[in-house]
Amino acid sequence: MPVNLSAPKAQDLHPVAGVRIGVAEAGVRKAGRKDLTVFLLDEGASVAGVFTENRFCAAPVQVCREHLQGGSAVRAMVVNTGNANAGTGAEGLARARATCAALARELDVDAAQVLPFSTGVIMEPLPVERIEAGLPAALADAQPGHWARAAEGIMTTDTLPKAASRRVEIDGRAVSITGISKGAGMIRPNMATMLGFIATDACIASALLQPLVKDLADHSFNRITIDGDTSTNDSFMLVATQRAGHAPITSLDSAQGRQLRAALLEVAQQLAQAIVRDGEGATKFITLRVEGGRTGEECRRVAYAIAHSPLVKTAFFASDPNLGRILAAVGYAGIADLDQTLIDLYLDDVHVAVRGGRNPAYREEDGQRVMKQSEITVRVVLGRGDAADTVWTCDLSHEYVTINADYRS
Amino acid sequence: MPVNLSAPKAQDLHPVAGVRIGVAEAGVRKAGRKDLTVFLLDEGASVAGVFTENRFCAAPVQVCREHLQGGSAVRAMVVNTGNANAGTGAEGLARARATCAALARELDVDAAQVLPFSTGVIMEPLPVERIEAGLPAALADAQPGHWARAAEGIMTTDTLPKAASRRVEIDGRAVSITGISKGAGMIRPNMATMLGFIATDACIASALLQPLVKDLADHSFNRITIDGDTSTNDSFMLVATQRAGHAPITSLDSAQGRQLRAALLEVAQQLAQAIVRDGEGATKFITLRVEGGRTGEECRRVAYAIAHSPLVKTAFFASDPNLGRILAAVGYAGIADLDQTLIDLYLDDVHVAVRGGRNPAYREEDGQRVMKQSEITVRVVLGRGDAADTVWTCDLSHEYVTINADYRS
């Protein structure tokens, strides 16, 4: 039961000139599921990405990094669900390369111009022959208007497809931005989410794309957590097809650069938050805002300590204002010289704790009122400095345990 | 449903000369519960302790540290359940001091000779008047043989009391060691468990007690985790009453020192493991052994990453050999230069992964067989060095969510 999230409507997702998408049922793990998606990019597109920091990164992540570093122009991305091709050793690498080679043959490009993505069960051999067999159907399906199909095609334990789209005007030209994401568990991205793809037809210098995708990730996919488990396959890709016809953006600090970044960030944050809203078993969407830290990094440490505390998460699930659990999490966040007597805690507009102790004016019924909402902002003021940061998470429910105890069955 | 744990029998717990224990029902939070325990120490006892590293440490922890640093001979310890007196600011400190003063008056000692301990709900005012009113009954109850009652008296969400006892002979004299512990959730001790008390009548130089209690904690209470939540109230106390009559131990490296340490460690490990066995909702007891690390610290990082992964914990609950989740946790444990191609994974005697990939000889039914056991050892070999360490944990079940969603109701 996702929190205030609904499936995107196909007509709300703007096509991006220079991108065609095809989806097929390849039977990677189960029959009758859209489990194979290809993105076909016209010549001239620029591509950048960020990937998981998990040292057990999956074979496709290793191949993506290799192909991007090699500098060949990317012409296609291929995504399978049902199998993560992670923890699969040298054979896994060979199979990820075989997937690229098969699609490259169909498109008459180099294998190094194809980026592979996999998501699903870890430590099982990738059935590469089924993927190869499914490629012709995916290619036959390719259309600019297939973003909604792609959002479905990359789902695993997601209960809803996730997509977002914006149109902005730059120098009098319409620029489209459309993206999709997937993920519901094993979510604590540490570069990017499980899988996220955003494309725009904006014209922007290729050299700006890598810093831009990192910046976007740091303010969207790298600020969400469901269960603190960093996936082996996290990938977030940004494509600029350079087709919108305006003068190319050569600086992210220009008016046009800032405008494009803002619109991209809206899409990235919406996609990232959609993953939390669809968090496995989630019943509440929680915004954790930590202020008054010395550095952004220590604000994030506090926010993640709260976000990962099973006790805090179960209290949210129960709508129980057992808010001392939040203070306890602040206390073990690893800030050695934290002074508890400087800390204030707010739940939305309710001032719960003052200088490390219960606010005398705090009434349990006020806390209770906020805890019953489906969207809650927790604000912690550390009283140490001027830095602040925000992390989004969800609660921990029976359903999370059910989903993850039964995932493979 | 604790994992292979039963309530201690009173007759199995050796009294410790110089220690008397009394328990009463003070109605701290609920009526009809043993919620107030006093330990009375004869003159001459040495006491040392380790406490939570949570920066939001509770008022009683602050007072304990202050009294121990002051150097007055400790003559009593008083423990209440039902209220943690944490997140309670200056008023909480005043109430912890008032508790000490009240017991000191009854015993005609200084308030600084009393150590206070509290456990229960955070951020609620401590009902100190109920504790004061309950003290006479607790004192009237004081007996050397009341260890089993004390084990009951300090329980909160524990389903069973926890105690352990040993008798060893040092220089021809019988030496008794008896201890109790409590805790089932909010368990990731980072100095000591929620509450642990061990007493011995051994004769040992007072100066050795503090390094000894730290050493014991580091190999017992500091190696367990249930939910990664470090409590605000963790305290582990070691009492030596100096009454056994053997020549005083003046070095932990002497034969007698090593003998005493070994016996104390057995008791401490049994008490620490009992907390995991009684972990909230636990159905499995998991030993995480990480070998081949460069340092013990990196082995512990890997072990805790596995121990705190909700995905790993739910897989154990489901008896599902979805063992790629363990590799993923190893990958995000924060070892920047970890090489996945050197890593082996074992589940008891089953060799699951070889050099970062699935062992070709691994059969799912072998993994399944081990996963169904109530006690499982996960062994990860990092292939980087000679260090090793062990952490104990439990699984994550529906019951954990139920207990923590309902704790206050």
Image: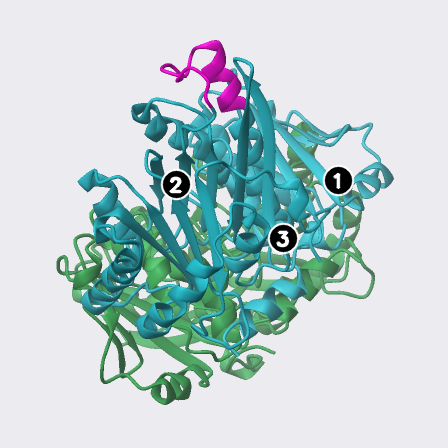
Chain colours: A green, B cyan
Which circle marks residue B191 in the picture? 2
- Determine if residue A39 is in view: yes
Residue A238, position in %: x, y? Answer: 42, 56
Pinpoint the chain carrying mark 1: A
Name the residue beneath numbered marker 1.
Answer: A125
Residue B115, position in %: x, y? Answer: 31, 50
Q: What is the C-alpha distance between the residues marked 3 and 2?
A: 20 Å
Q: What stretch is highlighted in magenta?
A: B245-262
Q: Which amino acid does label 3 sit on?
A: Asp
Which circle marks residue B278 in the picture? 3
Pinpoint the chain carrying mark 3: B
Pick the residue in front: B103 or B119.
B103
- Label 1 or label 3, whichever lies nearer to me, is 3
Would you place residue B89 above or below residue A105 in this image?
below
Residue A166 shown in magenta? no
Which circle marks residue A228 in the picture? none
Q: What is the C-alpha distance between the residues marked 1 and 3?
A: 38 Å
Query: Which numbered disc, 3 or 2, marks the residue that appears first in the sequence?
Result: 2
Q: Which amino acid does label 2 sit on?
A: Met
Residue at image coords 50%, 46%: A74
